[in-house]
Image: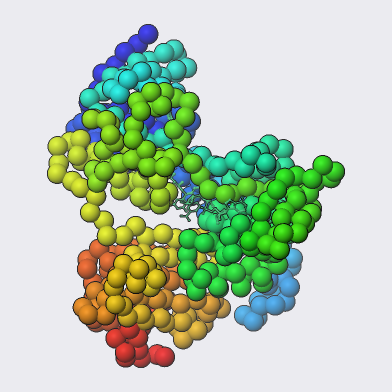
Amino acid sequence: MKEIACKLLVIGAGPGGYICAIRAGQLGVDTVIVEAAKAGGTCLNIGCIPSKALIHAAEEFERVSHMAGAKSPLGISVEAPKLDLAKTVAWKDGIVGRLNSGVLGLLRKAKVKIVHGKARFRDGKTVEVETETGSQVIRAETVVIATGSEPVELPSLPFGGPVISSSEALSLKAVPKKLIVVGGGYIGLELGTAFAKMGSEVTVVEATEQLLPQYDAELVKPVAKRLGELGVRVLTGAKAKRLSDEGLALLVESANGEEQRLAADRVLVTVGRKPCTEGWGLEELDLDRAGRFLRIDERCRTSMRGVHAIGDITGEPMLAHRAMAQGEMVAEIVAGKKRVWDKHCIPAVCFTDPEIVTAGLSPDEARAQGFEIRVGLFPFTANGRAMTMLSEDGFVRVVARADTNLVLGIQAVGAGVSELSSTFALAIEMGARLEDIAATIHAHPTRSEGFQEAAMKALGHALHI
Ligand code: FAD
Ligand code: NAD
C-alpha cells in the first residue's frame, strides 16, 4: 500500500474543493486533492453548467419556434425549427469536457497532487483511497471535507426507470412527451421550463402553496405567468404519492385531498439535495452536525481540530459561489493568513424565465430583523432597453434602512437580470446607500438603469416613472 503525507488534503474536487486546492497550491501549501468522480463536481458535471447549457438551447429553440408561428412582432418569419436533443446533449457534454480538463490543468499549474478514487476516513488525519492502481493512504496535517450533496429521493418514488433525478434529465436523448416535475424549486423550475420550451407537456407538482417558496411572492409572479404562457400546468399544495400500477402515470394528492392520475413519460424528482455524509467513514469522526449538514464556525472549522468543511456539505445556501468563497478562505487560513467569513450577502440567481436575483434582505426579512425600511421598486415596463428586447415583465427592488438609507437588500426579476447580481452584491458589500446608487451614472439604454431608478424611487424622486 502506497503512503503519502501532505500539509493539506482536500476531499472532493467540486467548486469548493478545487478552488481551495488551487489557492492553497498558489500559496505554496503542499496539497493533495482526492476526487471519486470527475473534477468540477456537481456544478460542472451535472449541475450549474450543463443545466445552463440546456436552458440556453431551449431558449433559442423556443425563440425560433415563436417566430415560425408568425407571432413575432419583429417582422421575422422562419420555417418551423427541429430539435435534435442528442446533438444538444453532445454539445453540452463538450462544454463540460472543456471545463473539466480546464480544472485539472489549473490544479496541476498550482502544483496540487490529484488522486482519483473515493476517500475513506481511517481517522481525522488519514484517509485511504481505492485508486485504479491500488490502495493509497494519505496523511495530512489539515483536512478539508468538500464532498458536496446529492439528490433527495422520495421513498415512495425511488429513482429508476421513468423516475429520474436532475442528473439523468441533463442527458436525455429525446424530449419526453409528457414530463411531470415533482418539486417546484430551483431545479424543477429551471429544467421544467427548459423542457416545456423544447416541446414537453410539463406539469409541476409542488407541495407548498407557492412555486419557489424560498422567494417572495412578488418575485415569483412573473415566473408563474410565463409558465402559464408556455403551457406548463402547475399544481401547488399537491403531494406526489407513487407511480400508478397500470400504465405510466403519477398519482398525486391535490390541495383539496383528491387523488389525481397524471399521465407521464418521465417523472423528474427535484425535492432538494442532501449532504454526502454517508458511506465513506465520516460517521466514525462523529463531527457535530447542524441538522443533516456538518456544523462549521466562521472559519469553516468543524468540531474536530484540523478538519474544515466547505460547500454543500455545510448546508444552505447550497450554491457553487458560496462553496468557492469558502474554499478560497480556508486555503488562506491553512497558509497562515488571518481570514474569517465576513460576507454581507451571498447573491442567488434562479435561471427561470424570467430570471430572479436576490442579494441581501427582502422587505419581509428586513422587517423581521427589526429594521424600519424604505423600498423602491422600478418596473421594466418603464425601461427602454427592456422594451427593445420584447421583455418588459419584472422589476428591480431596493430595500434600505429608513434612517440611514443603507442598502440592505436588492432583488430583481426579469430577462437577463442574472448579470446584475454582481452589481447588487457589490453595492451591499461596499455599504452603499441609496444616494450612492442614485448618483452613479448607469449607461443607457440598459436594464441596469432600473437599479438606479429603484434607488431614486426609494428616495422619492424617480425620473422615469
Ligand atoms: P460538489 O460540487 O457536489 O462536489 C463534491 C465532489 O466531491 C464531487 O465531485 C464528488 O464526486 C466528490 N466526492 C464525494 N465524496 C467523495 C469521497 N468520499 N472521496 C472523493 N471524492 C468525493 N449552484 C449555483 O450556484 N448556481 C447554479 O446555477 C446551480 N445550478 C445547479 C443545477 C443543478 C441541476 C444542480 C444539481 C445543482 C446546481 N447548483 C447551482 C448547486 C451547485 O452545483 C452546488 O452548490 C455546488 O456544486 C456545491 O459544490 P461543492 O464543492 O460543495 O460540492
Ligand atoms: P429546492 O429546495 O430548490 O426545491 C425543492 C422543492 O420541492 C421545494 O419547493 C419543496 O417545497 C418541494 N418539495 C419537497 N418535497 C416535495 C414533495 N414530496 N412533493 C412535491 N414537492 C416537494 O431543491 P432543488 O430544486 O432540488 O435544488 C437543490 C438545491 O440546488 C437548491 O436548494 C439550490 O441550492 C441548488 N440549485 C441552485 C440553482 C441556482 O443557483 N440557480 C439551480 C439549481 C439548484
How far across and how far down the image is residue 219, in percent?
A: 49, 71
The picture places residue 441, in percent across and down from the top left corner, at 28, 80
Give the residue drawn at x 22%, y 66%: 430
Give x and y (percent) for residue 21.
30, 35
Q: Residue sitting at 37 percent across and 42 percent down?
A: 290
Q: Residue at x 23, y 30 (%)?
A: 305
Based on the displayed image, in which of its 4 quarters is residue 126 positioned? top left
Q: Position of residue 94 (x, y in %)?
A: 54, 43
In the image, is residue 127 above or below residue 1? below
Residue at the far front: name it: 257
Quadrant of the rendering where the N terminus is positioned: top left
Colour treatment of the image: rainbow
Q: Is residue 99 visible?
A: no
Looking at the rendered image, the quarter that the C terminus falls into is bottom left
Q: Is residue 162 visible?
A: yes
Residue located farthest toward the right when viewing the structure as drawn = 246
Report the label total.
Answer: 0
Quarter for ligand 1? top left
**Relative to residue 228, is residue 445 drawn left or right?**
left
Task: Write down the quadrant of residue 445 in the picture.
Answer: bottom left
Between 314 and 288, the residue placed more toward the observer is 288
List the single residue furthest toward the top.
1
Q: Say which residue appears at 29% left-offset and 36% top-offset.
A: 302
287 left or right of 217? left
**Along the viewing direction, whichever of 87 and 179 lies nearer the viewer:** 179
